[in-house]
Image (tube, rainbow, N blue to C red):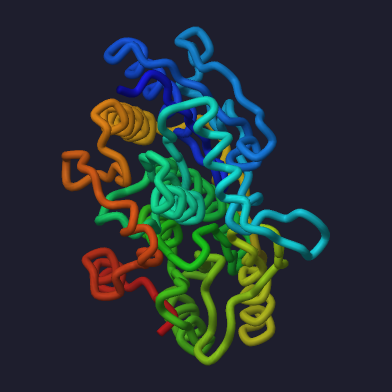
């Protein structure tokens, strides 16, 4: 019988995290008479024994708020815990011991990194339920959208709408760089919704010749500007992704970024057309979640708490069509879900004349 459940948010922040926390607490208290505690700042808070009680009053008013009231971090993996500069140890047993001091089970809200840690802890006997979160929409858990994604690409779409006006006014090429790591879901969705002329994805290596051909086609139609959306993981044929920096102690050590500037500079050099780049960066993570993300996050929180109350551990909740179903946490270990290059969205983009760089 579960009497108390712990919850933590790990990895990058995403719009909708607070909605999940709120739903878990309300469901636990109202439906199951179960207490909820929160570990602050992800697994870092576990290792440092930093907890807070989560009552209904504590989660009042947080539904529309971005970020997470618990804080988060993508560092301090207990299986590779930094104990000194350049020195790491497996502290997973200590992590499990601390969690069991406070709660009977753990709900992990996170992306592939945090959920992979949750899976490893579950393999060592800790009762774990996962809740998928990432603006990148790249979790290998069914075909579901993750909450935070809708808000992120809606903001990127708005940015494209604004950039359209200034690009047209100045007859420029404007490159918009968006997040997504090794998957191009944000770039593809925003590019389609925002009327981009070129969309560059990690899944489809590009050539400058292809992009310039599209720009020249537009010029021949007296369209003297072009909008390019570049996912941060996009790369040219035979080239590499642009790495901004590497953080050794992180569960996701490689930080991508800079492809937008590279593409804009090269296009200006080759075409003679003034080119600019806008990098949305963490603006995509902030702000109030869209209604879709609020509802999806709430449903995930309720479903995760239901699983914990039933003692159904080792699963992550996932949207399958219109229903939320449990999927084994082991699915997360299979890697990320990239854009289907033969899928309907890619097909639609090609048919309306969007250049994908190939």
Residue 158 x, y percent position in the rendering: 49, 45
- Tally of marks: 0
Question: In this view of the protein, which residue sits in the foreground, 208 or 283?
Answer: 283
Question: In this view of the protein, which residue sits in the foreground, 260 or 318?
Answer: 318
Q: Using residue 267 as the reference point, say whether residue 109 is left or right of it.
A: left
Residue 200 x, y percent position in the rendering: 47, 72
Q: Which residue sits furthest top? A: 57
Q: Using residue 36 as the reference point, say whether residue 347 is left or right of it.
A: left
Residue located 41% across and 75% down the image: 203
Instruction: Tell me the quarter of the picture where residue 174 sits.
Output: bottom right
Residue located 73% across and 55% down the image: 82
Residue located 53% across and 25% down the image: 102
Question: In this view of the protein, which residue sits in the foreground, 229 or 301?
Answer: 301
- The answer, for residue 110, to whether it is visible in the render is yes
Q: Using residue 343 as the reference point, say whether residue 36 is left or right of it.
A: right
Q: Which residue sits furthest right? A: 85
Q: Which residue sits furthest left? A: 322
- The answer, for residue 295, to whether it is visible in the render is no
Residue located 41% across and 79% down the image: 204
Quarter containing the N terminus: top left
Residue 124 x, y percent position in the rendering: 43, 51
Q: Is residue 161 above or below residue 230?
A: above
Q: Is residue 20 above or below residue 223?
A: above
Quarter containing the C terminus: bottom left
Residue 144 x, y percent position in the rendering: 28, 50
């Amino acid at each position: 019988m579960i009497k108390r459940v712990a919850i933590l948010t790990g990895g990058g922040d995403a719009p909708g995290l607070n909605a999940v926390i709120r739903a878990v607490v309300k469901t636990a208290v109202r439906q199951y008479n179960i207490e909820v505690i929160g570990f602050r700042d992800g697994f870092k808070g576990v290792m440092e024994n930093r907890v807070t009680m989560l009552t209904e009053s504590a989660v009042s008013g947080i539904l529309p708020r971005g970020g997470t009231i618990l804080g988060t971090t993508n560092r301090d993996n207990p299986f590779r815990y930094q104990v000194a500069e350049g020195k790491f140890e497996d502290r997973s047993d200590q992590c499990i011991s601390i969690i069991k001091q406070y709660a009977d089970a753990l709900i992990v809200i996170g992306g592939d990194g945090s959920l992979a840690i949750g899976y490893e802890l579950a393999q060592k006997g800790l009762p774990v339920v996962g809740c998928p979160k990432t603006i990148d929409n790249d979790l290998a858990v069914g075909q579901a959208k993750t909450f935070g994604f809708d808000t992120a690409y809606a903001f990127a779409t708005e940015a494209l709408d604004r950039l359209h006006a200034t690009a047209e006014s100045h007859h420029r090429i404007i490159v918009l760089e968006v997040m997504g790591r090794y998957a191009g879901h944000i770039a593809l969705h925003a590019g389609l919704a925002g009327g981009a002329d070129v969309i560059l994805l990690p899944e489809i290596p590009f050539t400058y010749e292809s992009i310039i051909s599209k720009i020249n086609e537009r010029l021949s139609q007296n369209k003297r500007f072009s909008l390019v959306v570049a996912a941060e993981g996009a790369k040219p044929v035979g080239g590499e992704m642009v790495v901004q920096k590497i953080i050794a102690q992180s569960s996701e050590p490689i930080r991508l970024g800079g492809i937008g500037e590279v593409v804009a500079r090269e296009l200006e050099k080759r075409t003679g057309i003034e080119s600019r780049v806008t990098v949305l960066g963490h603006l995509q993570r902030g702000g109030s979640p869209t209604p879709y993300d609020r509802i999806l996050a709430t449903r995930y929180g309720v479903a995760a708490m239901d699983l914990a109350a039933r003692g159904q551990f080792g699963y992550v909740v996932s949207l399958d069509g219109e229903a939320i179903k449990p999927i084994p946490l082991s699915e997360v270990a299979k890697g990320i879900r990239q854009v289907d290059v033969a899928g309907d969205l890619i097909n639609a983009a090609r048919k309306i004349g969007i250049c994908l760089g190939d």
